[in-house]
Image: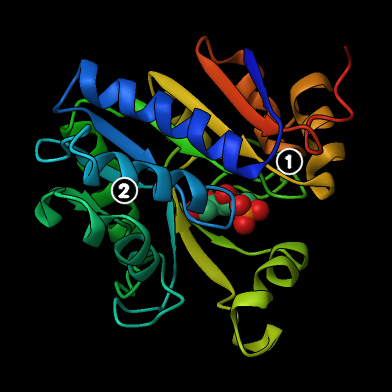
Amino acid sequence: MRIIEAKDYKELSKQAANIIAAQIVMKPDCVLGLATGSSPIGTYDQLVEKYENGDLDFSKVSSVNLDEYRGLDHENDQSYYYFMHEHLFDRVNIDAENTNVPDGTNPDAEAECKRYEELIRSYGGVDLQLLGLGHNGHIGFNEPAPIFEKETHCVDLTESTIEANKRFFASADDVPKQAYTMGIGTIMRAKKILVVVSGADKADIVAKAFFGDVTPEVPASILQMHPDVTIVGDAEALAKIPR
Ligand code: F6R
């Protein structure tokens, strides 16, 4: 596990974007696993800047997103599909045909999760998976649970996640109660993993997830077992890790 400490959010976004850019330069037809949420927004802005400066070409890149709310369609501005187009896909020369987000409008959860898992396998797996970290240790929408769910599946969101995500909706009642998410096995099969964490409110969970016991009650703790994980955090988020 490599830990890169950045002085602030802007710096961490630059560092994370550099790692993703290096992946694209080394393998122009790479498969990126992407995340939504607040943490990677700055990283996407930095990637767009590199593209606009002529330093990065997304034309051969494919992407698979971690997750999507069940029931939200592409036009819904809270869908992760919408988020990805707004923050990255519509701002760079990635071929929209090569971008993938679980289809929240497919009411058949089992069929959709199976399709998505097979799609990722058909790409030959993910070269670099970008992750944020939930306050309860969730990655994707893999919530604390008695076991690690291996493959893409449908989850009931916890109160803590609904509470954290309600800031994007009119009220907590409007937050969808379920989501489709890559499983822990799906995430762990990525060749490289890049975690971006920012802010004092993440300091406790960063220490617990990456220096505490490996347990499905803290889903991100499994990343300790992955051979190639880089955590890029600002000083506040890394304040409680053992030195
Ligand atoms: C997003 C996702 C979530 C977020 C996590 C942290 O696709 O899967 O696991 O990464 O909830 O969110 P932020 O970055 O908003 O703190």
Is 199 above or below relative to 186? Answer: below
Local secondary structure at mark 2: helix
* Quadrant of the rendered image containing residue 215: top right
Closer to the camera in the image, 17 or 29: 17
Q: Are marks 2 and 1 in contact (CB under 8 Å)?
A: no
Looking at the image, residue 121 sits to the left or right of residue 17; the answer is left
Query: Residue type at mark 1?
Result: Pro
* Quadrant of the rendered image containing residue 239: top right
Mark sitting earlier along the chain (2/1) = 2
From the Cβ of disc 1, is ligand 1 less than 8 Å away? Answer: no
Horizontal and vertical percent position of residue 181: 46, 52
Identify which residue is drawn at 49% across, 34% down.
Answer: 14
User: In this rendering, does residue 127 appear at all?
Assistant: no
Local secondary structure at mark 1: loop
C-alpha distance separating marks 2 and 1: 40 Å
Quadrant containing the N terminus is top right
* Quadrant of the rendered image containing residue 53: top left
Identify which residue is drawn at 61% across, 23% down.
Answer: 223
Looking at the image, residue 191 sits to the left or right of residue 89; the answer is right
Horizontal and vertical percent position of residue 235: 78, 32
Residue 48: assigned label: 2
From the Cβ of disc 2, is ligand 1 less than 8 Å away? Answer: no
Residue 146: assigned label: 1
Query: Residue type at mark 2?
Result: Val
Residue 243: assigned label: none
